[in-house]
Image (cartoon, rainbow, N blue to C red):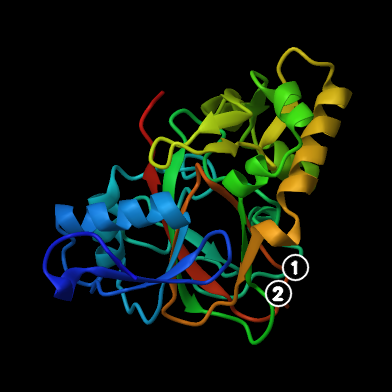
Amino acid sequence: MFFGRGNPMHTLTLSPLHPVFVAEAQGLDLRQPTDPAEAAQVEAALDEFAVLVFRDQVLDESQQMAFTRALGPVDMGLLKVLQRRSRFKEAGMIDISNVDLESQILTRDDPRLITMLANQLWHSDSSFKQPSARYSLLLACIVPEQGGETEFADMRAAYDALPDEVKGEIEGLVAEHSAFHSRIQLGDQQYTPEDLAKYPPVEWPIIRTHPGSQRKTLFIGAHATRIVGWPVPGGRLLLADLLEHATQRQFVYRHTWRPGDLVIWDNRAVLHRGRRYDLSQRRELRRSTVEDVRV
């Protein structure tokens, strides 16, 4: 499948990897500057497939960030709080690894590891801020022998499959999203009142319309703390039911990483989570993120 316009040598070729979303993408050399026509092809492909897998991408930090910036402004995520120092020279590069600043594997009782473990909960990047994240770009550098996959769940297909009575029940509902809700649930108590104040909760409709595809999508996940205007217990149970529905196997793609994989996903259309692995084995991935427009 060819996608986009222009010189065929620079046309994105897409091969579906799942019945409802996800495609392997070929045809672009991401080490080279991305022109507006190529960026438009990537964005159109993401509107359709929501997740793109680029194989064999040997990118340095600068090349990854250049490609990121070609798709929009950089989202800093939780870098205001979580990474006061970084192994990376590029501002906005996020370390999705189980190593410290000296590249030594973290011990299991290191509090910094909790941040990595929180990635194993279903979530949408930066849903705890306004604007939230548009795209995330995750590059695999070193992967463990087993485990450590990343799963993606299509929130468009999940919405489509809801019973009509549930669609009616949740129409117009708004959820509060908090940056620290999922981490505190895992026992992470490292945040000061000043840290918490940097990311006050934000509110998002549970049902959103994707601006590119015009498909309705669920916007839920681990950062969603409660439903505005509902008693907390009832709201959390509804959010849990929606998440259970949305992450059924027919909506989920599991990506098994190999070094050089660059996976791009649209946070407005999918949830994702990392999977368990032997924490004594080195796992190094780096993420850059594109900020969405303010709504």
For residue 82, above or below residue 128: below
Can you say which quadrant of the picture contains the N terminus?
bottom left
- Badge 1 amino acid: Arg
Q: Tell me: 188 left or right of 241.
A: left
Q: Which mark is residue 108?
A: 1
Q: Position of residue 137 (x, y in %)?
A: 42, 59
SS state under label 1: loop
Is residue 225 visible in the rendered image? The answer is yes
What residue is shown at x 26% (from left), y 59% (from top)? Answer: 67
**Mark 2 or 1, which is nearer the eye?**
2
Q: Tell me: 233 left or right of 70.
A: right
Q: Quadrant of residue 179?
A: top right
Q: Which mark is residue 243?
A: none
Q: 282 and 8: which one is in front?
A: 8
Q: How many marks?
A: 2
SS state under label 2: loop
Residue that extends furthest to the top in the rendered view of this protein: 229
Q: Are marks 2 and 1 in contact (CB under 8 Å)?
A: yes
Q: Label 2, on which residue?
A: 279
Instruction: Judge the density around disc 1: few (<14), some (14-19), many (≥20) Cα neighbours within 10 Å.
Output: few
Can you say which quadrant of the picture contains the C terminus?
top left
- Badge 2 amino acid: Leu
